[in-house]
């Protein structure tokens, strides 16, 4: 459970599946450690921290299309799993719980989305517990203060989050998987704000583990890990000692506020720091004070404007 996997790059490797123009050189000597707090055999049973609940997430059985009638979330590990769930439609439903609470943000990523609406997802909470390389690429990460975190959702009994749901074309699945590659994809059943259950599932980006990312997404290839994370000096993705990226947190709060008071208060009270005890509302009165008064860089004002 506490073993650490040391990864060492002893030589350059071009095998990242990139074009020559986009290929990223691997330093001749680059070493970092990837700590794995969970064994790979338990990677599908995330713990709901703080409640002692162990919630099992089952991989989808492609040979049996019975998911629509099931309440428990199922993991979608690859494109074929997505196809199995959404076999009877040209669209897949996607859950937004952070930046995708903003329709403007959602359309910047999925310009052809349809049916953008609010929903409630029971049995989950939001956590600022994963390092996001995109914040380093856009110059808004603050590693010196550990303000480098994005959002994930994780199962937690008794919790609920107000989210958005919208549909995208099935041909967008591969790009969606690559864009959200560090997450575990779950097929979940939200409900309307007045309590009517969805009859078909939606895809949620949920918490994963460092080990699962390396073994499943990177296929055990340290060059792939370097391409996604190592080049930013990130050696661990899922952490409980980091804080929200300030620009991103402000954006998410504004997006929730634009949805109305219920969504806004839900975001403040059902979104937690990596310690899983400090809510965003509490954070804004302490170390996070002043975030809402800070403007994003000029180049990012549209993308991170709520």
Image (cartoon, grey):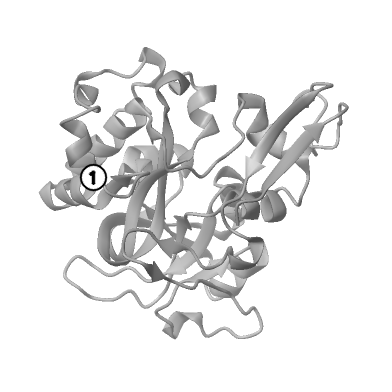
In the drawing, does residue 303 fall left or right of residue 233? Answer: left
Q: From this view, report whether residue 84 is shown above or below residue 125.
A: below
Question: Which quarter of the rendered picture does the C terminus lie within?
Answer: top left
Name the residue located 24 percent from the left edge and 68 percent from the top edge.
192
Q: Looking at the image, can residue 116 be seen? A: no
Q: From this view, report whether residue 269 is shown above or below residue 145.
A: below
| Res 225 → quadrant | top right
Q: Looking at the image, can residue 189 be seen? A: yes
How many marks can you see?
1
Where is residue 186? Give x, y as percent: 49, 64
Name the residue located 19 percent from the left edge and 25 percent from the top edge.
289
| Res 20 → quadrant | top right
In the drawing, does residue 19 fall left or right of residue 246? Answer: right
Where is residue 124? Give x, y as percent: 34, 62
Where is residue 115? Give x, y as percent: 34, 57
Q: From this view, report whether residue 198 is shown above or below residue 131.
A: below
Name the residue located 65 percent from the left edge and 41 percent from the top edge.
34
Disc 1 crowd rating (10 Å Cα; few below 14, some 14-19, many 20+) is many
Q: Secondary structure at mark 1?
A: loop
Name the residue located 23 percent from the left edge and 47 percent from the top edge.
267
Question: Which quarter of the rendered picture does the N terminus lie within?
Answer: bottom right
In the drawing, does residue 91 fall left or right of residue 34? Answer: left
Residue bearing the label numbered 1: 279
| Res 21 → quadrant | top right
Q: From this view, report whether residue 70 is shown above or below residue 230.
A: below
């Amino acid at each position: 459970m506490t073993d650490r996997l040391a990864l060492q790059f002893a030589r350059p490797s071009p095998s990242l599946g990139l074009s020559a123009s986009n290929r990223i050189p691997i330093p001749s000597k680059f070493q970092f450690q990837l700590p794995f707090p969970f064994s790979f055999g338990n990677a599908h049973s995330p713990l709901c921290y703080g409640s002692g609940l162990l919630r099992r997430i089952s991989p989808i059985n492609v040979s049996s299309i019975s998911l629509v009638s099931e309440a428990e979330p199922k993991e979608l590990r690859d494109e074929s799993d997505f196809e199995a769930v959404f076999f009877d439609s040209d669209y897949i439903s996607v859950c937004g719980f952070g930046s995708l609470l903003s329709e403007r943000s959602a359309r910047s990523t999925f310009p052809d989305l349809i049916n953008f609406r609010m929903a409630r997802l029971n049995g989950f909470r939001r956590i600022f517990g994963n390092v996001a390389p995109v914040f380093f690429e856009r110059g808004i990460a603050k590693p010196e203060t550990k303000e480098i975190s994005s959002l994930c959702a994780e199962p937690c009994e008794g919790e609920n989050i107000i989210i958005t749901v919208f549909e995208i074309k099935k041909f967008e699945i591969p790009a969606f998987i690559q864009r959200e590659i560090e997450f575990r994809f779950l097929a979940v059943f939200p409900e309307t704000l007045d309590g009517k259950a969805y009859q078909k599932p939606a895809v949620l980006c949920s918490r994963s583990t460092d080990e699962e990312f390396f073994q499943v997404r990177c296929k055990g290839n340290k060059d792939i890990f370097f391409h996604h994370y190592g080049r930013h000096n990130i050696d661990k993705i899922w952490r409980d000692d980091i804080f929200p990226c300030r620009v991103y947190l402000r954006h998410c709060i504004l997006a929730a506020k634009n949805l109305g008071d219920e969504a806004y208060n839900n975001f403040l009270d059902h979104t937690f720091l990596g310690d899983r005890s400090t809510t965003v509302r509490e954070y804004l009165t302490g170390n996070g004070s002043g975030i809402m008064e800070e403007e994003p860089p000029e180049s990012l004002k549209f993308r991170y404007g709520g």
